[in-house]
Amino acid sequence: MVDGGGTGVEVSVVQRSRPAVPALAVLAHHLTGYRRTWRAGIFSSFLLPTLTVVGFGLGVGAYVEQGVDGVPYLDWIVPGLLASTAVQVAIAESTWPVFSNFQWTRTYFAQSSAPLRVGDILAGHLGFVLFRALTASTAFLLVTALFGALASPWAVLTLPVVALLCLAVAAPTFAYAAAVSSDSWLAMLFRFALIPMTLFAGVFFPVESLPDGLRPLAYATPLWHAVDLCRAATLGVPPQSSAVGHLLYLAAWAALGWVLAVRLFRRRLVV
């Protein structure tokens, strides 16, 4: 309380204090909003995986009599579908929601006016995307377990792989959504990045079936590295390539995406 120099006017000075863990405060904000919409996610979390497994694993798999590399097609395709589902959730939560927070609702600007730094805002929102991807992946694992499509108890290790994959695709997508000026660019990301990556990164058929010139493009995607790790975990076999190499590659995507996202967020939010 400050005396107004003998005028009898007292001015109240309110000190803004930072939360103990600022990123958790941002995460709590997103979770609070999710409490109003989580019911809509039941369809995508449980029903869609069920339909996908039935359609591709059982429907298409019925025509793949010898399986893939001696593995029943349902067992072979499930880890790929698990990883691709996580990618779809991560990118969906990192495109229009991020763009909206800059252009439409301008939530990021309100948060930056509070005692929050750019890193806090970014980490809190990424934490929510990670939460969404992990809950969807857990639901997928439960559904596929009911179909008997998990051949190994090591399948639980797919969850940390999915978490790293989520960060590897979400962080660069945050940077992309912060850089574009129109949401039309977000649709292009789905059309020219997400869909080709899902089709040709070893989810539905082995990458070795691709022409030689296209294989390096498939190997360069984060999804292929996660698919190889998830397939090794659910089948209980070694991955095709080094597990450490896969993890380091995904971590490099996440780290680079974080650096770019922080730079672009700071350019937009810090005057």
Image (cartoon, rainbow, N blue to C red):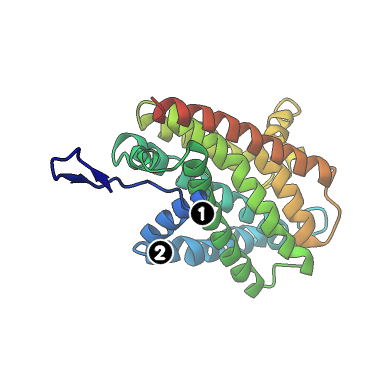
Residue 48 visible, this angle: yes
Residue at 58 percent across and 52 percent down: it is 86
Q: CA distance from mark 2 to mark 1?
A: 27 Å
Up-down: is 103 above or below 71? above
Q: Can you identify the residue that label 1 sits on? A: 20
Tell me which corner region of the image, top left, top right, bottom left or bottom right, holds residue 242: top right
Image location (x, y in percent) of residue 256: 63, 31
Task: Say which amino acid is labelled 2.
Answer: Trp
Up-down: is 61 above or below 119? below
Q: Is residue 178 left or right of residue 195?
A: left
Crowding at dot 2, Cα within 10 Å, few <14 / some 14-19 / many 20+, comes out as few
Residue in the foreground of this view, choosing between 93 and 46: 93
Residue in the foreground of this view, choosing between 128 and 159: 128
Q: Can you identify the residue that label 2 sits on? A: 38
Q: Does the residue at mark 2 contact the one at mark 1 (Cβ under 8 Å)?
A: no
Secondary structure beneath label 2: helix
Residue in the foreground of this view, choosing between 58 and 33: 33
